[in-house]
Image (spheres, rainbow, N blue to C red):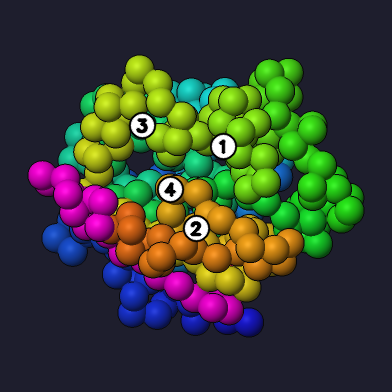
Amino acid sequence: MKTLSSILTSPALMVLLAVGCTSSYKHVIIVHGILSGPNDLQTLSRFITEEHPSTKVTVIDLFNNMESIKPLWKQVHGVGKVIQRIMKKSPRGVHLLCFSQGGLICRGVLSVLPNHNVHAFIALTSLLAGQYGGQKTSFMKSYYPSSATDSVYFLCYNKFMQKRISLCNFWNDPHQQVKYLKHNNFLPLLNGRKPHSKMAEWRKNFLRIKKLVLIGGPDDDVIIPWQSRFTFSDLSETNDDLFVIPRRPKHKMVAMEIKLIEKPPTCSFCQYDTLKQCVFF
């Protein structure tokens, strides 16, 4: 397994962490993932300040640890208010560096804030297309037993649980897409799978960013399918263990779709085959 130092000092990721900062450094805002808090990302924060001493870095101190399982719209609005306050003090723009579930929260914030000044959105091993599986990890074991993957939709796809637990907001069961689209009130709305009146507005807001950077790999042992880090669309499943991306790599599909926009953000997709989520702690 690569160490934090070897991964973060690689030329590609060094460029990503310093994205757009060659002439002056923008404020970096870090958003933690599920069942974690700001203390868990101090290594990452320290690395940035050591490499670029004049960079301001803020790790969001909100919805920490068990509070992080609260419904995602609640977290989007809460984190969004904090980010707005930081942006007002940073008129030249900010970067968002968002880890795991934090990537979904940042996606929501970027969609609902009409006048944000986020320059780069960097998603570190984020489940952008949702989760289905992963019960072998300590993270998923805290939610449900290993034999229950096929039954989680019974728990999640209803109004009651959608308003109470973040797992249900990003649970994307490929075998239950009708129920997923009908009852999930977060992910299909955010990713444009379920039509709604604010789709055009959210898309316009999100595309205010100048750079989109998606980082991940197949070996972090948490996010299943691992390709969820590289797409805002849905993946398909051929059997209980193998997820496939139809036709072409989804990250290429995202890039192709974004290129159709008049002023598209620059996109970077970084796959580290031995990257594990724990290296950022």
Instruction: Give the magenta part as a residue range.
Output: 256-277
What's the amino acid at mark 2?
A: Arg
Residue 61: which numbered mark, if any? 1
Residue at left offset 58%, top offset 71%: 218
Residue 25 in picture, x, y percent from top left: 24, 54
Q: Could you tell me how far apart the alpha carbons at marks 4 and 3 are, in whole angstroms?
A: 13 Å
Residue at left offset 65%, top offset 67%: 242
Q: Is residue 68 left or right of residue 129?
A: right
Q: Could you tell me how far apart the alpha carbons at marks 2 and 4 are, in whole angstroms?
A: 8 Å
Disc 1 and disc 4 in contact, CB within 8 angstroms:
no
Residue at left offset 34%, top offset 75%: 12
Q: Quadrant of residue 73?
A: top right
Disc 1 versus disc 3: nearer the observer: 3
- Is residue 128 a member of the stretch shown in magenta? no
Disc 4 and disc 3 in contact, CB within 8 angstroms:
no
Q: Secondary structure at mark 4?
A: loop
Q: Is residue 107 visible?
A: yes
Foreground: 34 or 152? 152
Disc 4 versus disc 3: nearer the observer: 4
Q: Which residue is mark 4?
A: 232
- Is residue 274 a member of the stretch shown in magenta? yes
Q: Could you tell me how far apart the alpha carbons at marks 3 and 2 are, in whole angstroms?
A: 18 Å
Residue 229: which numbered mark, if any? 2
Q: Could you tell me how far apart the alpha carbons at marks 2 and 1 are, in whole angstroms?
A: 24 Å
Mark closer to the chain start, 4 or 3 = 3
Q: Which residue is mark 3?
A: 111
